[in-house]
């Protein structure tokens, strides 16, 4: 909600200037007749979460240089500083998120889900695919708030940017896109996924190499056929590196690089370990160093370069977005999709 603040002297009194972005739905809160309880609570939470040393009692809320609201922060006022309520609905449940610039803000789960879907999903997806993703993203939000009391805007499972970030990107389709995302959120309101009574970790990838991977640390992740992924335009990629580039990347001599050796593969044909010179690294680290989309890699060593042919896009754990959309297009719903890629989980709903 707030993205910047300043403390200024006004008539010998410290006043907190809070700058708002149009990313969030707060128009009702800023009306002249609006109840100030929620905006006061959000303001106090912002001060507390960002360790702002503010001793005054007045805050100005500013949009585009214009003061749109004055909030009187009475120190003896009985306003609870809570991160969530017992209402787990997307409209009422509050999450705390640390943005890229390390500012900590509070917003409704609905606002968060709109931004996460806009950033991570493909808008042309089947609505049932979007619903499946929504339930998984909501599960992550509940899990992080329970365990860590806040969510990082950029993490290994999803990236958050405010929905308004995409207004120019979707300049002709913004309203229809917004309503499609909102439909996915509203029709799965309060729903989340558990295994053995606990929130799952929602692994998601773009497309697999034809099979998703199992992981013994997460018993709800099994090797599942996702043969639809063969048809994904992102399934196959060819990347060439010359030896000058590779010497900088691996900090090894050309001869050592030319003699790189795959030591072991996973049961899903992904590189488990590889040796370059005297260094042994795992397939994930190797993939990341080369900025490759997958660790299912065929390596072709040529005289002047090395060619890396990859299959799949992403970590291969959990739900394949391309495969999920093909399942949805065949007539299955979001629950079918979740149960296919996450065997033995339970979809639950707060009431």
Image (tube, grey):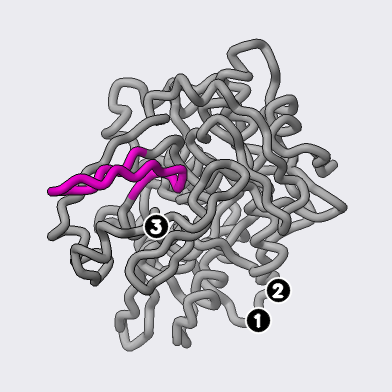
In percent of the image, x 43 and y 35: which residue is there? 311
The span from disc 1 to disc 3 (Cα, nearest Å) is: 68 Å
The span from disc 2 to disc 1 (Cα, nearest Å) is: 6 Å
Residue tagged 2: 78
**Depicted 73 relative to depicted 69: above or below:** below
**Depicted 225 relative to depicted 274: above or below:** above
Give coordinates of residue 90: x percent, y percent. Answer: 66, 43
Q: Which mark is residue 261?
A: 3
Residue tagged 1: 76
Left or right, residue 70 beside residue 167? right
> Which residues fall within the magenta stretch?
292-309
Foreground pick, 279 / 118 = 279
Left or right, residue 311 beside residue 132? left
In percent of the image, x 32 and y 52: which residue is there? 291
Foreground pick, 320 / 81 = 320
- State yes or no: residue 62 in magenta: no
- State yes or no: residue 300 in magenta: yes
Residue contact between numbered discs 2 and 1, judged by CB atoms under 8 Å: yes
Residue contact between numbered discs 1 and 3, judged by CB atoms under 8 Å: no
């Amino acid at each position: 909600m707030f993205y910047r603040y300043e403390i200024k002297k006004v008539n010998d009194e410290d006043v907190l200037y809070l700058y708002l972005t149009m990313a969030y739905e707060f128009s009702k809160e800023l009306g002249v007749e609006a109840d100030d309880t929620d905006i006061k609570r959000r303001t106090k939470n912002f001060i507390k979460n960002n360790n702002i040393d503010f001793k005054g009692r007045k805050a100005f809320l500013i949009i585009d240089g214009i003061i749109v609201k004055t909030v009187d922060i009475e120190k003896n006022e009985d306003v609870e500083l809570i991160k969530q309520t017992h209402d787990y609905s997307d409209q009422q449940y509050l999450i705390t998120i640390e943005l890229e610039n390390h500012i900590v803000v509070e917003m409704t789960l609905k606002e968060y889900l709109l931004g996460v879907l806009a950033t991570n999903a493909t808008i042309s997806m089947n609505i049932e695919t979007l619903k499946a993703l929504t339930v998984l993203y909501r599960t992550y939000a509940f899990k992080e708030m329970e365990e860590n009391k806040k969510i990082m805007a950029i993490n290994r499972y999803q990236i958050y940017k405010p929905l308004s970030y995409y207004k120019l990107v979707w300049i002709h389709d913004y309203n229809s896109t917004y309503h499609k995302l909102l439909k996915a959120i509203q029709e799965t309101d309060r729903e989340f996924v558990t295994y053995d009574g606990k929130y799952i970790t929602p692994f998601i990838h773009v497309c697999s190499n034809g099979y998703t991977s199992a992981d013994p640390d997460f018993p709800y992740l099994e090797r599942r056929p996702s043969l639809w992924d063969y048809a994904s335009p992102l399934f196959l990629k060819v990347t060439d590196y010359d030896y000058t580039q590779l010497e900088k990347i691996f900090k090894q001599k050309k001869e050592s690089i030319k003699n790189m050796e795959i030591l072991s593969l996973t049961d899903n044909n992904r590189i488990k370990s590889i040796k370059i010179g005297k260094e042994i690294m795992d397939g994930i680290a190797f993939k990341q160093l080369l900025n490759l989309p997958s660790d299912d890699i065929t390596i072709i060593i040529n005289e002047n370069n090395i060619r890396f042919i990859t299959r799949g896009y992403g970590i291969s754990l959990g739900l394949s977005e391309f495969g999920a959309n093909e399942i949805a297009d065949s007539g299955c719903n979001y629950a079918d999709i979740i149960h296919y890629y996450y065997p033995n989980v339970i979809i639950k709903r707060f009431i």
